[in-house]
Amino acid sequence: MKGYWIVKVNDLHPDKQKIYKELATETVKKFNGRFLVRGGKNITMEGREFERNVIVEYETFDLAKQAYNSDDYQNAKKILGEDKDRLFAIVEGVE
């Protein structure tokens, strides 16, 4: 089954977010991930509002977890520090 990163973000520090985005993109490519959603127009119909939404597809759920737990991604995440406003889930697909 495919695996997905589903991320909802409010950008608190644009300077840090820009560096994080570059490093995280490298990780996604390294693990053969594919961006399905990356920003763009959105409307929150229920729940808490977030400025930005990202969905990355991986060939498997385990590969999505490996990408997240990789040293590359963990180093990218450190750029944001603890002062961030986001939800990050790894979800298994239905097919």
Image (spheres, rainbow, N blue to C red):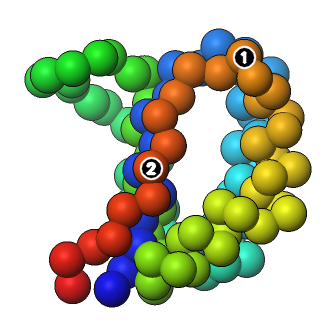
For the residue pair 15 and 9, the one nearer the viewer reads as 9
Residue 29 falls in image quadrant:
bottom right
Q: Check disc 2 and give the amino acid type.
A: Ala
Q: Can I make out residue 26 in this image?
A: no
As measured in the structure, the alpha-carbon distance from the residue carrying label 2 to the one carrying label 1 is 18 Å
For the residue pair 41 and 2, the one nearer the viewer reads as 2
Tell me the residue that label 2 is attached to. Answer: 89
Find residue 76 and report its horizontal and vertical position in percent: 81, 47
Identify the residue at horizontal 56%, vertical 20% (top origin).
85
Find residue 55 and report its horizontal and vertical position in percent: 41, 54
Is the residue under label 1 in contact with that under label 2 (CB below 8 Å)?
no
Mark found first going from the N terminus, 2 or 1: 1
Identify the residue at horizontal 71%, vertical 44% (top origin).
21
Quadrant position of the N terminus in the picture: bottom left
Q: Check disc 1 and give the amino acid type.
A: Asp
Count every numbered label the image shows and give the total.
2
For the residue pair 58 and 19, the one nearer the viewer reads as 58
Badge 2: few (under 14), some or many (20 or more) residues near its Cα, within 10 Å? few
Find residue 18 and report its horizontal and vertical position in percent: 75, 34
For label 2, the SS is: strand
Residue 83's mark? 1
Q: Is residue 36 shown above or below 17?
A: below
Find residue 68 and report its horizontal and vertical position in percent: 65, 61
Q: Can I make out residue 73 in this image?
A: yes
Identify the residue at horizontal 76%, vertical 42% (top origin).
77
Q: Is residue 45 shown above or below 89?
A: above
Residue 40 falls in image quadrant:
top left
Q: Is residue 88 left or right of residue 15?
A: left
Q: Is residue 45 shown above or below 79?
A: above
Badge 1: few (under 14), some or many (20 or more) residues near its Cα, within 10 Å? few
Residue 37's mark? none
Identify the residue at horizontal 77%, vertical 67% (top origin).
70
